[in-house]
Image (tube, rainbow, N blue to C red):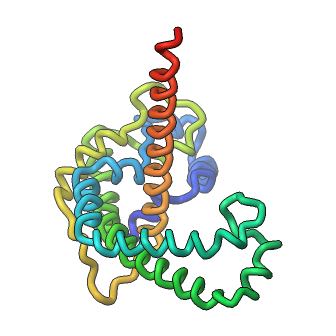
Amino acid sequence: MKNLMKFLAPAGLAIAAVAATAPAAAQVEGKVATANVSRAILGTTAFQTAYQQVNTTYAAQLETRRTKQQELSTLLQPFDTNGNGQIEDPEIAALQAAPNVTQISTLEAEIAAISQQVNNARIFAVEQILNQYPTVLQTFAASQQIQMILQPEAIQFALEGADVTPQLVTALNTAVPAVNIVPPADYRPSRQGAQVFQEIQQYLVTAQRIQQQQAAQQQQGNTQAPGR
């Protein structure tokens, strides 16, 4: 994981360091590309297979969590006075004074424990791919004679084809064809692993939201079509 830090360094620091130590002409010599480490891992076969395996292996825990979440939502509903689905500061006092606050706290702790168990399995899978990313990145850059690969956020403008994330997915598929989803008993996720996992989760949530919106629009279109 040590070598990964320079690839995940803030873009501003990386650019400032180059500007301070090299003449302007040197900054544009050679190929420059972009790659997103989280999207690269998300696109790998090892990651996608691991997520499916986690859903199967931890199916009982996930079902238990769903049941407990439904129970918790039912218990919290009377305290959600503004009906926004959240317990906000003005509503917390009533919740803390409620006779079933211990039951609610216990449910929250149980849900959190299950989530941690499942997420640790997912992060463990992500880290196994992440550990190989620096080597794969360097090997790919050397093979393509790329002098610098930056996170997309560091680039204000890039020509089509500058993003080499799809090529890195292919390279990672070769380097890491499969991963284990059962972490050791003393496993503790690394900071980098947890960060990349959170970014991947955000991509997945966004993709799911887009699919739901598209499905809703399609259904609405199908409903309106007969009346045209």
Tell which residue pokes out farthest to the front in this image: 227
Which residue occupies the foreground of this view, 126 or 122?
Answer: 122
Q: Quadrant of residue 99?
A: bottom right
Q: Which is nearer the eye, 148 or 60?
A: 60
> Residue 86: x percent and y percent?
68, 65
Q: Measured along the vertical axis of the image, is residue 100 above or below residue 50?
A: below
The number of discs equals 0
Q: Quadrant of residue 181?
A: bottom left
Q: Is residue 148 visible?
A: no
Q: Is residue 30 left or right of residue 152?
A: left
Residue at 77% in and 61% down: 82
Q: Is residue 54 left or right of residue 155?
A: left
Who's the residue at 49% across and 33% down the image? 216
Camera-nearest residue between 114 and 155: 114
> Residue 148, located in which quarter of the rendered image?
top left
Q: Residue 145 in the image: x percent, y percent?
A: 31, 39
**In the rendered image, the vertical position of residue 116 relative to residue 169, given as above or below:** below
Viewer-nearest residue: 63 or 44: 63
Q: Report whether residue 108 is seen.
A: yes
Looking at the rendered image, the quarter that the N terminus falls into is bottom left
